[in-house]
Image (spheres, helix red, strand yellow):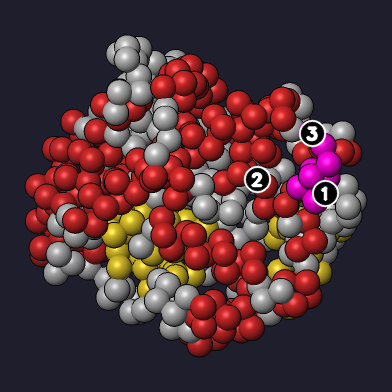
């Protein structure tokens, strides 16, 4: 359940009361893990997988009522419903919230906790990055005047006129961090772990690349020579041209994989378990010349996965990592995964007719990139629907909703962990789908739950199923 999809009076889910209510409901049902999408500042198309930073949090999730409780807002925040009750209006919610955040900044007086937060070495550079981006009409840093592009390298450009904006951005980051860590602590106190999500690649227009451009295959002005994606397959005849810059693995080797180590170190503060997206790229990655308009042209390049993970576990021996190992993989990817004892993933929508019912894995009905169970089943050819229904006879009558039967199938499996999207618990169709890979923009990432009533009705049955399958 993405934080953004939580019920809210402000157009997008927040880290406030409804998030705490959700934790209470999960605990009452016996749920032990809440998996979320990345919380980093949303980039192009409001995608959490094209963030402006791998470290910062998006201020859109800050709860205004919590700021009021601290005395930072002295007037009751106006509600912002958005255009439709089950859709997130990112732009409108962001504009509405910023008005109050800037008022709160004026009343903020700092303190020891704030000073300690500022010791994270990414905070000030991120604030400068966003201040310069705002000054340049939100253009990518690669389009800024050269002296501004190079501030992070030589500090020659005078940013004194941006002092107030930089201060505001650091304040917003502190409030996100403070509210998130409070919510995480509350969830942990209820016996619930938070599973965060770490994109493999980073966005070109990000603090990550702006400040560490030597770690990527780009020229000094930020123009990539090669970009990331995946080659053509059954679903995409042109492949997927993601556009993210490729890591310069030779450079990363020389500096001890500093970027990845620091990224994971900080993420392990924010989350209890880390799901790393596109795990296969630690073994081999698809390298596309930036000049190519599709992902058809490219080559598989071996990555130093063993060297990197040896260093990760040397420096961060207690880190909990899950590998997103979906797709058509060469055997070496699974050997790498198993060498470090990492759990992989099994998506029932892909495997129910060819079961991979094994331990040491997480099993899902579907992920954020899948159709909902109801939408998936509806779109299957009649012959496939008949086969799926027969496989699931043990889990309910063919007349019962497919989402209910598929959830029982997943919960009854031998997998160590079973995870079910909220949309499937509610039995929703594809209007509640979170993302369609290979597409950008609306309606991706826009679904949200208007209120808790439908979930509350399902808690008793969910609790009973968890007990029945001994997952409590």
Which mark is drawn over residue 125?
Answer: 2
Q: Secondary structure at mark 2?
A: helix
Q: Residue at x 28, y 39 (%)?
A: 19
Q: CA distance from mark 3 to mark 2?
A: 14 Å
Q: Residue at x 67, y 52 (%)?
A: 208
Image position of 416 (left or right of 206): left
Q: Which residues are magenta?
A: 150-158
Give the vertical position of 302 relative to 90 (above or below). Answer: below
Q: How many marks?
A: 3
Query: Which residue, given by chain and number where applicable, does mark 1 sit on?
Result: 154
Image position of 64 (left or right of 398): right
Q: Quadrant of the N terminus?
A: top left
Image position of 339 (left or right of 85): right
Whether residue 344 is visible to the viewer of this picture, yes or no, is no
Which mark is drawn over residue 158?
Answer: 3
* Residue 165 position by quadrant: top right
Q: Are marks 3 and 2 in contact (CB under 8 Å)?
A: no
| Sequence-wise first label, 3 or 2 | 2
């Amino acid at each position: 359940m993405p934080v953004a999809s939580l019920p809210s009076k402000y157009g997008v889910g927040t880290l406030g009361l409804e998030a705490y209510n959700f934790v209470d409901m999960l605990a009452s049902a016996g749920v032990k893990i809440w998996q979320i999408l990345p919380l980093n500042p949303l980039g192009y198309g409001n995608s959490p997988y094209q963030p402006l930073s791998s470290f910062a949090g998006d201020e859109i999730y800050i709860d205004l009522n919590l700021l009021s409780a601290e005395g930072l807002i002295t007037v009751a925040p106006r509600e912002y419903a958005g255009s439709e009750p089950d859709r997130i209006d990112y732009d409108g919610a962001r504009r509405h919230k910023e008005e109050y955040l800037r008022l709160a900044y004026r009343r903020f007086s700092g303190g020891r906790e704030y000073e300690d937060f500022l010791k994270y070495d990414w905070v000030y550079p991120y604030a400068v990055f966003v201040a310069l981006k705002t000054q340049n009409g939100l253009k990518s840093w690669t389009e800024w005047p050269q002296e501004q592009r190079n501030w992070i390298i030589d500090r020659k450009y005078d940013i004194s006129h941006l002092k107030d904006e930089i201060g505001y951005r650091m304040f917003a980051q502190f409030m996100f961090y403070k509210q998130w860590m409070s919510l995480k602590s509350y969830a942990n106190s209820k016996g619930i772990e938070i599973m965060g999500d770490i994109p493999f690649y980073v966005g070109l227009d990000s603090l990550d690349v702006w400040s560490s451009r030597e770690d990527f295959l780009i020229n000094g002005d930020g123009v990539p020579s090669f970009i990331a994606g995946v080659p053509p397959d059954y679903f995409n005849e042109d492949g997927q041209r993601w556009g993210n810059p490729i890591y310069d693995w030779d450079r990363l080797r020389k500096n001890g994989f500093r970027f990845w180590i620091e990224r994971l170190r900080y993420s392990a503060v924010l989350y209890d378990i880390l799901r790393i997206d596109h795990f296969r790229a630690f073994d081999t990655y698809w390298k596309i010349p930036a000049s190519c308009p599709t992902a058809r042209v490219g080559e598989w390049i071996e990555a130093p996965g063993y060297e990197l993970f040896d260093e990760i576990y040397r420096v961060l021996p207690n880190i909990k990592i899950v590998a997103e190992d979906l797709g058509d993989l060469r055997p070496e990817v699974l050997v790498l995964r198993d060498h470090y004892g990492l759990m992989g993933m099994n998506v029932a929508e892909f495997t129910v007719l060819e079961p991979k019912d094994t331990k040491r894995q997480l099993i899902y009905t579907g992920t954020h990139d899948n159709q909902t169970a109801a939408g998936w089943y509806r779109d299957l050819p009649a012959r496939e629907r008949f086969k799926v229904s027969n496989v699931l006879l043990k889990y309910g009558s063919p007349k019962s909703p497919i989402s209910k039967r598929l959830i029982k199938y997943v919960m009854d499996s031998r997998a160590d962990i079973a995870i079910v999207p909220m949309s499937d618990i509610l039995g929703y169709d594809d209007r509640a789908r979170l993302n369609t890979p290979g597409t950008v923009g609306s309606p991706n990432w826009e679904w949200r739950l208007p209120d808790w009533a439908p979930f509350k009705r399902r808690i008793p049955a969910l609790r009973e199923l968890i007990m029945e399958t001994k997952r409590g």
